[in-house]
Image (cartoon, grey):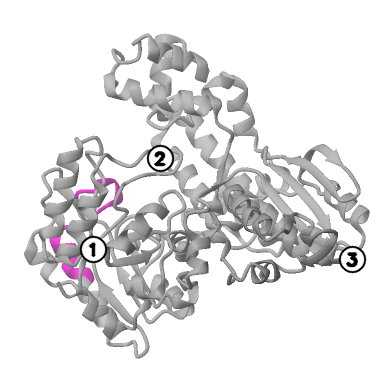
Amino acid sequence: MPVLNSDIARSLEKLADLIELEGGNPFRIRAYRTAARVVGELPRNVLAMTTAGEDLAELPGIGKDLAGKIETLAETGHIAVLDEMEKKTPPGLLALLDVPGLGPKRVRIIYDHLGIRSLSDLATAAKSGKIRGLPGFGEKTEQRILQEAEKRAGAAARIKRPVAEDVAEPLLRYIRGAEGVKEGAIAGSYRRRKETVGDLDIVVAATRGPEVIERFVAYEDVAQILARGPTRSSVVLRNGMQVDLRVVSAANYGAALMYFTGSKAHNIALRGIAAARGLKLNEYGLFDGTRRVAGRTEEEVYRVFALPYIEPELREDHGEIEAARQGRLPHLVTPADIRGDLHVHTSESDGRASLSDMVKAARTRGYAYMAISDHSKRVTVAHGLDAKRLARQSDKIARLNETLSDFTVLRSVEVDILEDGSLDLPNEALAGLDFAVGAIHSAFDLPRDKQTSRLLKAMDNPHVAVLAHPTGRLIEQRGAYDLDIERVLAGARERGCALEVNGQPDRLDLNEWHCRLAKEMGVKLVLSTDAHSVAELGFMRYAVDQARRGWLESDNILNTRDLAGFRASLRR
């Protein structure tokens, strides 16, 4: 069976968790986590790299021993050390590691003190108040753990966009290789570019349905066949994801793609429009009685309704149909509109590539500029910069700019916003930069008024031009901190500060609703990757996805402008 990069990264991350769970060497733990991140970012399949003779030990942070383990994982899907650790770890503890607010150290504490080894045990202990008295816990932590345990016990598993892509795109290419396939696409929440993906829905136009189905169920990654028919089939892949395939004729491909893309609410609204006109819309087409009047393409269906094409990201029944009727659909931002990345880390802090490597990669992407925004000193785990190191980096960037004729490196810093709203670096240090990016990395549990005031005070500083990952959430790991987002947006507008749409798949912060609200309120926005490596510069597409779901257009985003326009927009 094919071993995907996401499979390898997941195995390395699990190994790090299990080592930490038993109190192992922190350097070893960090090495496995670094390796997981590096592998997860690789643009090519690991097995393809090793087959081509590439040395994995040359990857950043990967030594010879780790390279051997990664190669073994790529070839077999297993490594002995992980298999051994999984055997001696109570199975329920692995599920507990996924609960936000726990982590290996806390899981070990509740296991040692209370014997908890499952989500149901965890929920029961939290309800009875047994967790709050443990070392390092409290009543608020106990309540958060209870909420997450109950939510996970009843929720269907969903995965983040990069992992979904790693699974979905090779499968789609494989299906398209069947004889008679004309076109095909992944529909559902994947096509609507939602933050996480559950099941995959694939729609294919083909002349030989049974042959396509046979090829599909024979895919090496299929673990279980749930259903198989001449034009449809459902399977479960090794990672537990269900995939449903529909094979249709070219004449109704557009209708089927529309139907399976959804959302359900958008489809219901369209069927209502059809019914009002005496028509019937379903996955086979748009019908007037028994006569098909549209269905070959999605555009054809919308045209019959006198509507322009509605982009998949907007199909949530959140006003897009009325906007289409009134000619007010947004001209959504595209990756080609982005002129520069404004939140990038280097090896000066916790990045994994040098300044020159990041600049080279950004120029390859066709950007005109990029801001280096390494962490400030408060983030000690990231080897953050103090005023002296920041000044030295600024001088280095100035010298580099003298050698560049078609690209500009902007001097910035991701400066920590302290609990009282003051900044981690003095104004004299920030004054020598092009701008500063303010961010919160601590004290997430402040009351709403204090957290909101903290952000407003930080934006009072004229050097802070961008507020990074403004709500602090980590998808499936940590909720947003409690704040009054409307006050923050209003404060940003009044101060001329931009808010970031962070493209890290763990963050995607602002969320789509906040993007749309910011647009309506006239708040400046930027799209950034928060990249810590060359590969992570590719996360810009996730920031663009998020912006599109939030109805954002090029004019709403500062880094769609040329350098002169961008610099002018930063003035406060």
Measured from the top left, where is residue 372 in percent x and y?
30, 68
Who's the residue at 76% across and 45% down the image?
A: 221
Q: Could you tell me how far apart the alpha carbons at marks 3 and 2 are, in whole angstroms?
A: 53 Å
Q: Nearer the viewer, mark 3 or mark 2?
A: 3
Who's the residue at 11% across and 53% down the image?
A: 457
Q: Which mark is residue 180?
A: 3
- Provide the residue designation for mark 2: 27
Element on which disc 1 rests:
loop
Q: Pick whichever, 97 or 264, lies toward us.
A: 264
Q: Could you tell me how far apart the alpha carbons at marks 1 and 2 are, in whole angstroms?
A: 27 Å
- Provide the residue designation for mark 1: 413
First in residue order: circle 1 vs circle 2: 2
User: Residue 388: within the magenta?
Assistant: yes
The answer to whether residue 486 is above or below residue 431 is above
Number of residues whose C-alpha sits closer than 10 Å to that of mark 1, classed few (under 14), some (14–19) or many (20 or more): many
Give the amino acid type for the residue marked by disc 3 in the picture: Gly
Number of residues whose C-alpha sits closer than 10 Å to that of mark 3, classed few (under 14), some (14–19) or many (20 or more): some
First in residue order: circle 3 vs circle 1: 3
Horizontal placement of 370 versus 104: left or right? left
Number of residues whose C-alpha sits closer than 10 Å to that of mark 2, classed few (under 14), some (14–19) or many (20 or more): few
| Residue 89 seen in the figure | no
Give the amino acid type for the residue marked by disc 2 in the picture: Phe
Horizontal placement of 357 versus 139: left or right? right
Measured from the top left, where is residue 397 in percent x and y?
26, 76
